[in-house]
Amino acid sequence: MNRKEIKFLVPIALLESVLKDCKNDYDLLKINELTEFKYSTNYYDTSDLKFYFDHHNGKGNRFKIREREYTQTGQKYIEVKTKTNKNQTIKFRNIIDNWSESKEFIEAHTKLIGSDLHQSLCSEYTRITLLHKQRKEKVTLDFNLAFFEKQQSIQYNNLVIAEVKADNISTIHFNTIMKKHKIRSGSLSKYCLGLISLNSTLKKNNFKMIFNQFINANNNG
């Protein structure tokens, strides 16, 4: 799970057209006759949101820690994602039954003490996954986005976050499809999007432009 990633913000109205354009070059992931998969994710951070601010400030070698549940099967994983100084994403994950099983895994991959972390955000969404027929290129299309934190919640129903995972971003085929629809790369991580959507006082200077684009696109979708 060592790859580079690039994201695109796609209006939900274009999803069917994008999928048609992908048909010849990508296989649609199907498991037990299902092609749409529901995800529920709990994110963890320090009390001062170190992981969020590391991302906001563009720090390399930063972490993201989450507990992900595949809703239809009930399987849960603890995941540690590292973003390196070379813009490489490295992900480690381990299947678990509950959060208490995660502490040793987190400490082994981050040197952080699990007990210093707290649940900072919850998210839910539906995912479609495409696999290129010839290249090592994976495209995920996430929609029906919802975020929850304490007693607050927000939904984004008019947008799709498309993310490409590949060895070499410069040669991905999905770029040609996005260019056809005049969509440029660029998006917030779902973690940062959820936090600033639910906390208007959270510092977001470096995210403000893309966040406003996200809000406007969703409102006009």
Image (spheres, helix red, strand yellow):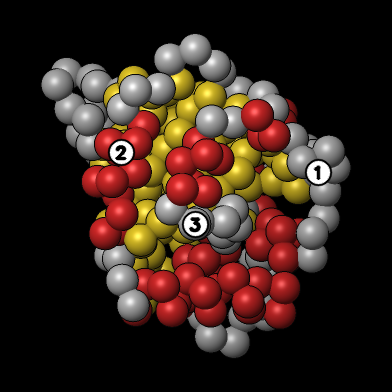
Secondary structure beneath dot 1 equals loop
Q: Mark 3 points at which residue?
A: 182
Expressed as whole percent of the image width and height from the top left, the position of residue 164 reads: 53, 37
Label ID, residue 19: 2
Q: Mark 1 points at which residue?
A: 61
The mark lying in front, picked from 3 and 2, is 3
- Residue in the image at 44% along x and 77% along y: 215
Name the N-terminal-most of marks 2 and 1. 2
**Res 155 quadrant in image:** bottom left
Expressed as whole percent of the image width and height from the top left, the position of residue 122 reads: 41, 58
- Residue in the image at 52% along x and 39% along y: 176
Which of the two residues, 18 or 142, is positioned nearer the viewer here? 18
**Mark 3 closeness class: few <14, some 14–19, many ≥20 residues within 10 Å:** few
Q: In this view, does 156 lie above or below 132?
A: below
Residue situated furthest top in the rendering: 134
Name the N-terminal-most of marks 3 and 1. 1
Name the N-terminal-most of marks 3 and 2. 2
**Res 19 quadrant in image:** top left
Expressed as whole percent of the image width and height from the top left, the position of residue 27 reads: 34, 20
